[in-house]
Image: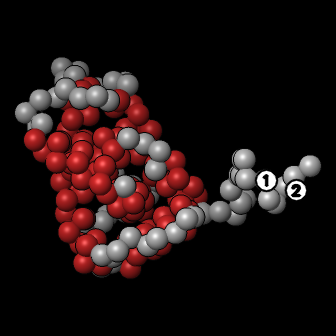
Amino acid sequence: MVEARTDLRFVLSDVDADPVCEAGMILLGLPPQLLLAGLGSCGSAADPGRIAMTVDRLRHASSATPGRPATSAMADAIAEGALRWRAARAALEIALPVLPASAAVRATFARCFEALGDMASPVIAGQAERAYIAVCWMRCYDVDRCAHQAVVDTSTSEGPW
């Protein structure tokens, strides 16, 4: 029988693990369109989980305003997220030019999140935005491509979400 400490098939996080770090692990699994929509929906919110739920509502069209299709609201959130990402990315390239390398994804997220907190930047408004930007930085190639497409596709409200 394999000892519990060496069995890596399924590992729960520690009970005292940082909840923002755990939310970051969930955010890492989202497609880049949803990361940008979350970044565009953050504002000064403190809870990345609430932002993820807001984006999910946008995606499922349950929060569409009367007379305005949900796809338009989602496209607006993605476009806003792309603008915020471009502004944050420029600051990140100066403050954290090399993404911290680690085989431990939680450690990389924690380093990125901490570095964003150390930046005196008016670009980053709250803890949720910091979490979304940290995840976007970790997945910058996908997010850059999506952000470029969002800027190009601002004339349409169609999307794969």
Camera-nearest residue between 3 and 131: 3
Camera-nearest residue between 3 and 84: 3
Q: Quadrant of the C terminus?
A: top left
How packed mark 1 is, by other alpha carbons closer than 10 Å (few <14, some 14-19, many 20 or more), is few
**Amino acid identity at mark 2:** Glu
Residue 46: x and y, percent?
44, 58
Is mark 2 in CB contact (under 8 Å) with mark 1? Answer: yes
Residue 16: x and y, percent?
70, 63
Q: Which residue is mark 1?
A: 7
Q: Residue at x 43, y 42 (%)?
A: 30
Q: Residue at x 19, y 26 (%)?
A: 158
| Direction from residue 47 to residue 88 in the image, left or right | left
- Protein image colouring: secondary structure
| Direction from residue 87 to residue 41 in the image, left or right | right
Residue 110 seen in this snapshot: no
**Amino acid identity at mark 1:** Asp
Q: Which residue is mark 2?
A: 3
Camera-nearest residue between 70 and 10: 10
Residue 34: x and y, percent?
35, 41
Q: Residue at x 28, y 28 (%)?
A: 160
